[in-house]
């Protein structure tokens, strides 16, 4: 259910833009990180069910830093609703520090 809450928060920002520009929204672009707590497909389906305009989704690669010195994309072991399990591809340490790719961001509103 929290995908609906996140979608509502995104759509509140879209409404602000729509009111400021005094034009109807044609499309929105939303970026979902590889290790965000919701899969891109779930966020996309939720947003598309809530609006009539075009929804464009972008995937953001994750970047992690491990104690072994590795910095880069993690090895994703499992991705599900509200959980993503990943490890360092170099040493297999579970859940290294996330540097990027864990957010869901409204990137663009086209009016």
Image: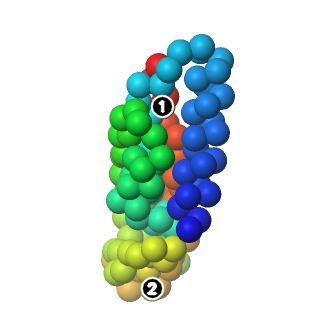
Image quadrant occupied by the N terminus? bottom right
Do we see residue 69 in this rendering?
no
Q: Position of residue 3 (x, y in %)?
A: 53, 61
Label 1 sits on a secondary structure element that is strand
Q: Position of residue 9 (x, y in %)?
A: 63, 47
Corner quadrant of residue 88: bottom left
Q: Residue at x 48, y 47 (%)?
A: 50
Q: Residue at x 40, y 61 (%)?
A: 42
Corner quadrant of residue 21: top right
Do we see residue 12 in this rendering?
yes
* Spatial CA span between label 1 and label 2: 36 Å
The residue nearer to you, when weighing 64 against 38, is: 38
Label 2 sits on a secondary structure element that is loop
Q: Which residue is mark 1?
A: 108
Circle number at residue 73: none
Nearer the viewer's eye, disc 1 or disc 2? 1
Q: Which residue is mark 2?
A: 93
Determine crowd level at label 1: few under 14, some 14-19, many 20+ residues with C-alpha closer than 10 A. few
Corner quadrant of residue 34: bottom left
Q: Is residue 22 above or below residue 77?
A: above
Q: Position of residue 85 (x, y in %)?
A: 44, 80
Say if mark 1 contacts mark 2, CB within 8 Å: no
Q: Of label 1 and label 2, which has the lower sequence position?
A: 2
Total numbered circles: 2
The residue nearer to you, when weighing 37 against 2, is: 2
- Whether residue 110 sits left or right of residue 22 in the image: it is left
């Amino acid at each position: 259910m929290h995908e609906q809450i996140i979608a509502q928060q995104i759509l509140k920002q879209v409404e602000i833009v729509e009111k400021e520009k005094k034009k109807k929204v044609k499309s929105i672009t939303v970026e979902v990180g590889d290790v965000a707590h919701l899969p891109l497909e779930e966020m996309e389906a939720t947003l598309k069910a809530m609006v009539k305009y075009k929804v464009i989704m972008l995937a953001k690669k994750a970047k992690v830093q491990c104690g072994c010195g590795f910095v880069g994309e993690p090895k994703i072991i499992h991705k599900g609703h509200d959980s993503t399990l990943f490890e360092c591809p170099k040493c297999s340490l579970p859940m290294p520090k996330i540097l990027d790719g864990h957010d869901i961001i409204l990137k663009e509103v086209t009016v």
